[in-house]
Amino acid sequence: MSENEEKYETLKLCNQLCFPLYACSKEIIRRYKPYLDQIDLTYTQYITMMVMWEMKSVNVKTLGENLYLDSGTLTPVLKKLESKGYIKRERSNQDERNLVVTITKEGEALKDKAIKIPSEMGACVKLTKEEAAVLYKLLYKIIGNVR
């Protein structure tokens, strides 16, 4: 390898950590699609509902922080979920500037339809619990380092 070729070695796709992360994310989300189609949700709507199932009521800022989404991305997702009857958005009684999102009974009932999705996806990914735990820890380490 010439000195000039070596100089550009870091620009090869095969030497990038970002590419397998991107490709993996894209493929995982693609594999979610058939399961999410059954409950009429996009992936972003699904992860939003996962937070709502856990928190029940949350302000939009906190929801965005949990999902790593900005308000420009989150607002249309929330409007769509509200139009489906899964959440409601209301101004906070304590501070009119805060928008609070609350899960509805319909949104809570959707959880029963989604309950099998994590195990179905786990079967697609085919990692042991130990491998999944290591990957989870490493991914969140990267997220923490780049934020």
Image: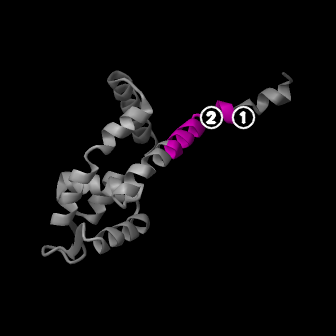
Q: Is residue 51 above or below residue 103?
A: above
Residue 26 belongs to the span the image colors magenta: yes
Residue drawn at point x = 38 percent, y = 50 percent: 35
Which stretch is magenta?
11-27
Residue 105 belongs to the span the image colors magenta: no
Residue drawn at point x = 20 percent, y = 51 percent: 54
Q: Is residue 129 above or below residue 47?
A: above
Query: Taking the image as drawn, is residue 94 in sight?
Result: yes
Residue 48 is tagged as none
Q: Is residue 130 above or below residue 97?
A: above
Label 1 – label 2 distance at C-alpha: 7 Å
Residue 140 in percent (x, y) is at 38, 37
Quarter of the rendering containing residue 48: bottom left
Residue drawn at point x = 24 percent, y = 73 percent: 89
Report the predominant secondary structure element of the magenta stretch. Answer: helix
Tag 1: residue type?
A: Lys
Position of residue 84 in the picture relative to residue 19 (left or right)? left
Q: Is residue 82 above or below residue 133?
A: below
* Tag 1 and tag 2, C-beta contact below 8 Å: yes
Q: Which residue is mark 1?
A: 12
Residue 17 in percent (x, y) is at 57, 34
Q: Which residue is mark 2?
A: 16
Query: Taking the image as drawn, is residue 57 in sight?
Result: no
Tag 2: residue type?
A: Gln
Residue 142 in percent (x, y) is at 44, 36
User: Callout 2 environment at 10 Å: few (<14), some (14 to 19), or many (20+)?
Assistant: few
